[in-house]
Amino acid sequence: MRFLPALTRVAALGAATTLAATALTGCGDDSSSDATANLYGLGQPGVLRAGTLTDAPPNVYLKDGRFTGFDNDLLTAVAGKLGLTVEFVGTDFSALLSQVNNHKFDVGSSSITITEARKKTVDFGNGYDFGYFGLDVPAGSPITSFDQLAGKRVVVVQGTVQDDYATGKQLNPVRVPDYNGAINQLRAGTADAWIAPAEIGEKSAADSNGKITVAAKQLSPAPTAYAVAKGGDKLREALNKGLDEVIADGTWSRLQAQYYPGRPIPADFTPGSGAAPVPSASGAPSASAAPTGPSASASTAS
């Protein structure tokens, strides 16, 4: 009978050991589960936090309090293929890339043109769209083409690809923080020309009561893409995969037709990796050469 307490103590010790092992195993499972749930290193598992703009239709803008536009609607569709929801947050373009690389945002969605300079700050996914530059001038200006800008006072929005273009052409541009600043320069006669995202330039001219006109357009030299933080390879690769899927299922073509009805697609432009077939869509024809005249439909490229 005196052996029973000892046996009881041994049994209790064994049970405690088993419970401890079970607890440790459970902790390990939770850690593994968390890592799987946040495979792409997002700030919040399951949520893709996207920095975007509020005033650049038809690509990125607010409508009835909701972020929309070609870029944002496409990103929502891509995220859906990955089982993610998107949380859009408005910001300034000049700060967007650094905010992405600092992980304030998981991705930048703002018709961002890929450039070598920007690759030093962020990594880019595959291109999903193309865009045009517009050349806005005061009404009555003799300027009719981009090659007439040497020696002129040219305004650009700071940090945009139009800024890069003007700087590369050694135009010594006047930099302003936003589109309204550029428009005001033209209205006041303190600038000879504004190199603008073509769609925004067109709308600004239409709203100017004849004070501003679109003198010319030309195709942007590189595609636009979503930006992720440097080293964010898993997210970048996932976005590329999702993009190919929405190209293949017709979403990309449908959004092109919705936001750019009748806009020709340059023959040498292929969205995504190029591996996914691009279904044709009414209103999104292809073109052997990109239109350059003022009447050509265009998209915004920042």
Image (cartoon, rainbow, N blue to C red):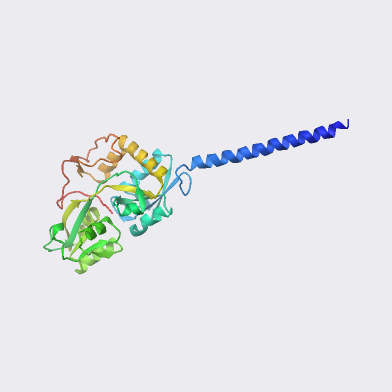
Frontmost residue, 69 versus 151: 151
With 87 as the anchor, is 94 left or right in this view? left
* Residue 61 in sight here: no
Which of the image's four quarters has the N terminus? top right
Which of the image's four quarters has the C terminus? bottom left
With 175 as the anchor, is 8 left or right in this view? right
Which quadrant of the structure image shows residue 262? Answer: top left
Which quadrant of the structure image shows residue 121? Answer: bottom left
* Residue 25 in sight here: yes
With 74 as the anchor, is 22 left or right in this view? right
Spot occupied by residue 286 in the image (x, y as percentages of width and height)? 19, 40
Spot occupied by residue 35 in the image (x, y as percentages of width and height)? 51, 42
Frontmost residue, 288 versus 79: 288
Frontmost residue, 109 versus 122: 122
Give the total of numbered labels: 0
Tell me which residue sits at (26%, 47%) in the image.
Answer: 223
Spot occupied by residue 63 in the image (x, y as percentages of width and height)? 34, 52
Spot occupied by residue 289 in the image (x, y as percentages of width and height)? 16, 44
Tell me which residue sits at (26%, 57%) in the image.
Answer: 164
Q: Residue furthest left?
A: 142
With 47 as the anchor, is 163 left or right in this view? left
Q: In the image, is residue 273 above or below residue 169?
A: above
Q: In the image, is residue 63 above or below residue 77?
A: below
Q: Residue furthest right?
A: 1
Frontmost residue, 167 versus 26: 167
